[in-house]
Image (spheres, rainbow, N blue to C red):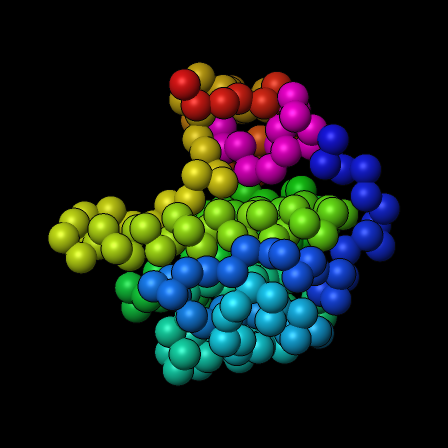
Amino acid sequence: MFRNAPASAWSPGALSKTAYVPEAEAPSVLLTVGDGDTDAFTYFGFTRAAARTSAEVPALVQRHRPAVAFVDADAPHVDAEACCRAANAHGLEVAVLVTCRAPQQVPALLIAGAHAILLKPFAPNLLAGRLGRLVREHTEHRRLSGWRNDAPFASHLIRRWADVCCPTCQEPNATAFDFTSHRRAWFACLACAHVWIDARREPV
């Protein structure tokens, strides 16, 4: 299981030096929002831009044009939904990974434009893996957009399932956004904002 880590298991300084480092052609700027130790992200090979509050995000996005944003939704003075909207304003399409402690926050975050969700607590290497996959997908999307720019960026870390219905409102197209184990996953209904745990689905 992924969720055996204690609540204090992750801290920015705990990131492994073997974490994913983007290739030369990958985007070079990572925007961190609400994280107090941005030096920890050195291991990802990025140039870092740091926002201590969500109010700083729009200006930093415009100035640095980051490829990826890491948002701590539980940090003081951080409105994670506003960060998601700012990161994708003006057609900039910044890939956004949000970490949060309360699953109930997730439907609104997805509607606001989050591309990946990681619920706390989590093991240190899980953040490295999620961020690495998000970077790879975003890099590939940017490469393909050179000749096909007909779809917005969407990560496979979040999937909609047409045959999974919300147990509260019965709306189909539930969104799987994180895993509790190898067999169970978190789902969200974007229609009524309900979240629940169900059997994990895998694409065929």
Displayed quadrant of residue 73: bottom right
Residue under the point 63% across and 52% down: 127
Image coords of residue 11 (percent x, y): 76, 61
Total labels drawn: 0
Image coords of residue 18 (percent x, y): 63, 56
**Front-most of residues 12 and 159:** 12
| Predominant SS along the magenta part | strand
Image coords of residue 120 (percent x, y): 73, 48
Vertical placement of residue 83 versus 55, above or below: above
Vertical placement of residue 5 versus 142, above or below: above
Vertical placement of residue 192 versus 107, above or below: above
Vertical placement of residue 95 versus 120, above or below: below
Image coords of residue 111 (percent x, y): 46, 48
Q: Which residues are magenta?
A: 174-186
Residue under the point 69% across and 28% down: 181
Q: Is residue 179 visible?
A: yes
Say which quadrant the C terminus sits in: top left
Q: Tell whether position 75 is magenta.
A: no
